[in-house]
Image: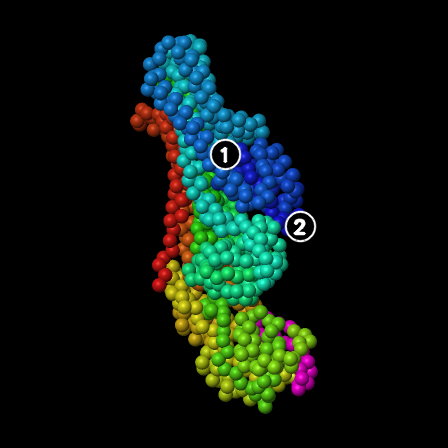
Amino acid sequence: MTNNKQDKTTQLALSGVTCAGCVGRIEKALNQAPNVVAAQVNFATRTADISGGDVQQLIQAVQDAGYNATLIEDPALSEEQQTKELQQLLKTRSWYAAGGVGLGICLMFFGMDIADPFILRAVGWLTLAMMMMTGEHFYKSGFKALKTGHANMDTLIAIGTSAAWLYSIVAVYQPTIFPENARGVYFEAAVMIIGLVNLGQVLEMRARLKTQSSLKNLLGLRPTHAYLVGSSEGESEEMVNILQVKVGDFLRIKPGDRVPVDGVVTQGQSYVDESMLTGEPMPVLKNIGDDLVSGTINGQGSVIYEATRVGADTALARIVEMVRKAQNSKPAISQLADKVAAIFVPVVIVIAVITALSWTFFGPQPALTYSFVTAISVLIIACPCALGLATPISVMIGIGKAAQMGVLVRNAQSLQQASNIDWVVLDKTGTITQGHPSVEDFAVFNNADPMHTLELAQAIEQASQHPIAKSIVTYCHSVLPDASASLAPKVESFVSVSGLGVEGVMEMEGMKNGEFTMGNVKLMDTKNVDLGAAKEWLAIQQTKGRSLVLVAHQGALIGGFGLEDAVQPDSADAIKRLKSQGIKVMMLTGDNQATAMRVAGLVGVDDYAAHLMPQDKLNHIKHLQEQGNVVAMVGDGINDAPALSQANVSFAMGQGTDVAIESADLCLLNSSLHGVADAIELSHATLRNIKQNLWGAFTYNSLGIPIAAGVLFPFTGVLLSPMLAALAMSLSSVTVVTNANRLRLFKPSLRK
């Protein structure tokens, strides 16, 4: 959460939410609360995410709508609490289901021929007692909703079962009120409906517990304690609760332990298994100065490191929060279901009334019995639970599955949009290539001193975080003698020229103070630097497809570096997978034409462009979109920010954990382009699953209501009993949740 009231996000746990219609009412109430920017309710998790607004006012808005809400302060603890509550509720509802169904079966088999009025009355009151005990939650919620001027799923069940019992008890005490052929009792139907609906909820809750596994797995990565040491040398050691760790503390990681918080190694070395976060199976060697990420597993070594991020700021905490928020978000495909659900229950009540009147006035005898049975069946079978679960349950599982695969999805809409991608546009450095270029050649020009040129290059590039700059610094450090450090030039000013290079002003022994420029050929051209002295050297570098970084002092060329960046071993295979899905692939780079041609040929892209500025990449994206294409951009999330923002779907490669978490629609925690192909395949699978659920839910209600109303009676002479309607309603929700859980078995196509 931020300090800005307009931007902060509040999460509420909701109670009393029984159907998709409730979701619409709560969202409407929250969105109308003061200072609320947006509110989304997830029916599957019974939670609400709200941007802006005051917590107490938000809770009051929910209560005014007829529901209850509590603030979720720690999503991790809330997830654990929700799981415990769901498990406890599962046990309770299981007993309720057994009691209701058990009594209903007994009445069906042993009570059909009861003629003694005294026994029938006893059965009626026994049935009422069982209905109150096993269905109290339905009646409280259903009639409370009516008091607030709306209706929900529980309202339908409460009205239907109450009507069945009242009809039956009146028929027992005052049988002469009804025609002789309409004096049947429906005690077994009333109690059986309650039992079957409870049974359906039990099956649904069992399936819902499975959907939480992905987030629970991430939460399970969080250690509960840490070994605090007195200094970077590890002079003393004390085991403390992870909540006590502060930024700047020194911690010891023992063999086999999980890293408790983010930090930097200060002593020792060890291999760390980062597969739970990145999906990469090979452990990574960590030396002094290397980053450690919370939740990863230490190997056999023992290291001491300094905590740099704790609590909600750690990479793992932010990943968990991103997954949770994404699971609560809604794709565009859910809008139709939301609109239908918002008016569904009132419409069903109207349909039930029309059904009853139609049978009463136009149906055969016993018309009263037929009208009663059909009206109750319509009320019971039409509950829109399946409709409300169709989208969120698939989104939850799909986004959770993506997290297990090392793909973080920022919102459900981007997951849906990924299934429509026509073009994938790739940055070169750090995306197709490894992002660790090495200097393959160095030369000086115009009688410049090699050592002074290297010292100059090292000094000016030390201020840059670009991979090429780091490679040049590493090369200079390896060539220059250690004694030269004391004679290193001082940077007076430093400016990064986006897409071109860097400029600076320095003070350096043996050289006049003045402007120094480092960058590509285009930057030298803009500064009118004469490249004639390097003509032959430049030609050689370009034929080898190398990236070029030139150095100029006071407008004169003094040196040049030729660099090569190895292609990722699996980039070609990943691009082949994308193309097999019918997607075209383009590479855009600021590098020279020769380098771009070499890399494009190695990986097999459909098109490429070189010598591009950030604005040029943006224009390429726009051009593709103007042709009607859905475009995805894959980059590092910083240099490609304009293009990433313009793209319909943006992917950030996981070269740096911060970048992977904070930028783009989908964030890949590893550096493989296979993650893009995996995400797109999962997007197709998730959207297909959502469509199956929505189609099934719409079909169920479209067919179920007419059948319950008796549309087949003229052809078959059979009506759907209220008990079968209750069973069908319950099984529809179970079917949707079970189908959504098939996504947990999703596996991307085989990688070569």
SS at badge 1: loop
Q: Earlier in the sequence, mark 2 or mark 1?
A: 2
Which label sits on residue 4? 2
Residue sitting nearer the eye, 469 or 623? 469
Q: x%, y% of residue 579?
A: 39, 63
Q: What's the residue at 62%, 76% (across, down)? A: 460
Q: Quadrant of the C terminus?
A: bottom left
Q: x%, y% of residue 32?
A: 62, 40
Furthest-front residue in this view: 235
Compared to residue 467, the image places residue 279 above or below, namely above
Pointer 2 and pointer 1: residues touching (CB < 8 Å)? Answer: no
Q: x%, y% of residue 227?
A: 56, 54
Which label sits on residue 161? none
Q: What amino acid is at disc 1?
A: Thr
User: Distance from label 2 to label 1 (Cα)?
Assistant: 33 Å
Q: What's the residue at 45%, 13% (across, down)? A: 170
Compared to residue 501, the image places residue 185 above or below, namely above
Magenta range is 495-516
Classify residue 518 by image quadrant: bottom right
Q: Is residue 82 visible?
A: yes
Q: What amino acid is at disc 2?
A: Asn
In the picture of the structure, the residue carrying the numbered disc 1 is 18
Residue sitting nearer the eye, 240 or 14? 240
Q: What's the residue at 53%, 85% (across, down)? A: 443
